[in-house]
Amino acid sequence: MTVNVGVIGVGMIGKDHIRRLTTVLAGAAVVAVSDVNAAEAAQVAARLSGAVAHPTGQDVISDPAVDAVVVCSWGPTHEEYVLAAIAAGKPVFCEKPLATTEEACRRILEAESAVGRRLVQVGYMRRYDPSYRALKAVVDSGDIGTPLMMHCTHRNPSVPGHYTKDMAITDTAVHEIDLARWIFGEEIVAVTVLTPRKSRLGGELQDPLMLLLEVEGGALIDVEISVNIRYGYDIRGEVVGEEGTASLGESSPVVVRRNNMYSGRVPEDWRERFIRAYDVEFQEWIDAVRGGGRFGPSAWDGYAAAVVSDAAVTSLLGGLGRVEVSLGEKPSLYEISG
Ligand code: NAD
Ligand code: ISE
């Protein structure tokens, strides 16, 4: 069975996901798209065989030809589309963040719980990256003993003009918030945001930032967020255990030694660094939609990331230091997480 997908939002990542759904992966076709930029949606549809451009995202969801929905519009618009897909009983892959407020995420949890089956997957693609998967496998094997700390680095060469102060957390650090929960298998209970000396390249932004996440069992995760580092897209991670450490390998496919120097490639952006992760993420999602596998990061994971993000934004913008996090009770639908 081919899964007929409708894509809402055909900006940078929407186009990249359409490319992988139509030219890289097996078992899917893109049959409908929409974007508030209608001209862009029409152009994207025209380049696909058999796809239509609809005036609104709601039209994509209600199109009978659409089996499953991919949401790649801006964060504040996600809730509306995810709720509509749940109401239509259609599986929905929502790019991160699931929604931009705790209340919006709660409404999604309630709607999906009322249906009683998983329909929502959130785009936390690092869980599909071969390096992060290998790192987690080492931690889970017990080979480095009990994990005590993790050091994370998340550097972007630059960010678009509409990127605001809070987005360093809600758009960028949210990946480490999700992966800390995933690597340690524990919820985050407190967050502190620290503000080092500002980079002159960051303009109005507070750049860089340092986050300190505390998980239930007492382990600490520090996260450097730099979004104007210029030299490339650089993602690092190291878990420190009682008996050893485990780090992500270098991402350069080749290292050249020449003239007493050695060099490798630093990726241009997230599309290059996580290309394989996105491919695996979407292939597993298509397989789950076809009934041959399980859905990945859930609405609960999206909710937890949003609550921790809210606390981090409070710490940053309110200058409040350490802010405690409480998630409340997990609905039974999410007891087995993706
Ligand atoms: P973008 O600005 O390039 O594209 C967003 C598109 O959505 C634009 O074309 C815009 O016109 C459209 N849009 C906005 N509101 C809409 C609405 N109500 N209905 C339909 N279309 C609408 O942004 P992007 O970089 O592609 O990011 C899109 C989403 O993907 C964001 O939530 C972002 O956080 C996420 N993202 C995830 C990753 C990742 O690594 N997983 C990477 C980049 C972006
Ligand atoms: C972007 O939205 C992403 O999700 C990227 O993975 C992240 O590195 C970047 O900072 C975000 O703006």
Image (cartoon, helix red, strand yellow):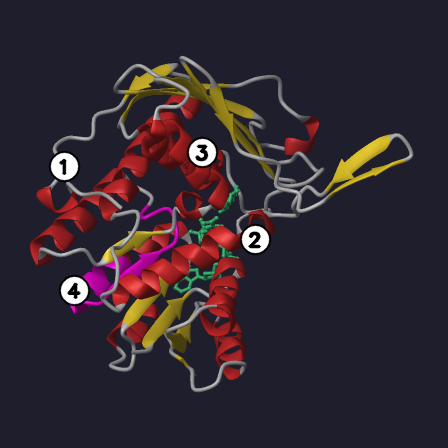
Q: Tell me the amino acid under the disc marked 2.
A: Arg
Residue picked out by circle 4: 87
Q: Is mark 1 on a helix, strand or loop?
A: loop
Q: Tell me the amino acid under the disc marked 1.
A: Lys
Residue picked out by circle 3: 135
Q: Where 63 sits versus 226, above or below? A: below
Q: Is mark 2 on a helix, strand or loop?
A: helix
Asked whether, in this view, residue 191 is left or right of residue 20, the answer is left
Residue picked out by circle 1: 330
Residue picked out by circle 2: 271
Label located before the other in sequence (1 or 4): 4
Looking at the rendered image, the quarter that the N terminus falls into is: bottom left
Query: Disc 2 versus disc 4: distance between alpha carbons?
Result: 32 Å
Classify mark 2 as within 8 Å of ligand 1 or not, answering yes or no. yes
Query: Disc 1 vs disc 4: which is toward the camera?
Result: 1
Query: Disc 2 vs disc 3: which is toward the camera?
Result: 3
Q: Magenta stretch?
A: 82-99
Label located before the other in sequence (1 or 3): 3
Q: Which residue is drawn at 28% across and 30% down?
A: 185
